Amino acid sequence: MPAISLNPTDNAVLDLLIEGRCTPSYIAQETSYSRGNIQNRLLRLVEHGYVRQLGGGLYELAEDPRSS
């Protein structure tokens, strides 16, 4: 799958996931983005293999695409 172009929401999500596992609700609470927007971006990051969904709405960073 080709690399993705990251937007500001993706960067905010990745910044929080670097610190540890998070839920979409937590990320939305810590940023200025809606939970729905965060959820959409997380699904896209999972699709590209940068984030893993652990179940129960918990996500963790698999690989930071910004460090490539």
Image (cartoon, rainbow, N blue to C red):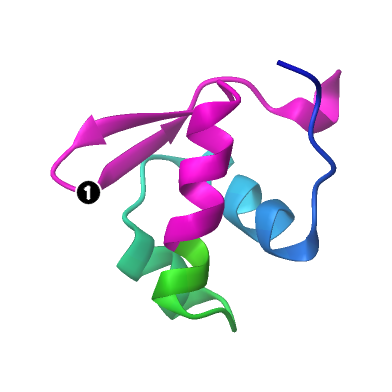
Q: Position of residue 35 (x, y in %)?
A: 40, 74
Q: Residue at x 49, y 74 (%)?
A: 30
Badge 1 is on which residue? 57
Q: Is residue 19 visible?
A: no
Q: Residue at x 42, y 78 (%)?
A: 29
Q: Residue at x 68, y 53 (%)?
A: 10
Secondary structure under badge 1?
loop
29 is higher (above) or lower (below) than 1: below
33 is higher (above) or lower (below) than 26: below
Q: Give the residue type at disc 1.
A: Gly
| Left or right placement of residue 18 versus residue 55 in this view | right
User: Which residue range is magenta in the image?
Assistant: 39-68
Disc count in the image? 1
Quick check: is 11 in the magenta stretch? no
Q: Is residue 63 visible?
A: yes
Residue, far left: 56
Q: Residue at x 49, y 57 (%)?
A: 40
Residue, far front: 1
User: Which image quadrant: the N terminus?
Assistant: top right
Q: Position of residue 66 (x, y in %)?
A: 82, 32
Q: Position of residue 31 (x, y in %)?
A: 56, 76
Q: Nearer the viewer, residue 20 or 11?
A: 11
20 is higher (above) or lower (below) than 38: above
Q: Position of residue 55 (x, y in %)?
A: 17, 35
Quick check: is 52 in the magenta stretch? yes
Q: Residues within 10 Å of mark 1 (few under 14, many from 20)?
A: few
8 is higher (above) or lower (below) than 4: below
User: Which image quadrant: the C terminus?
Assistant: top right
| Left or right placement of residue 27 versus residue 48 in this view | left
Q: Nearer the viewer, residue 2 or 13?
A: 2
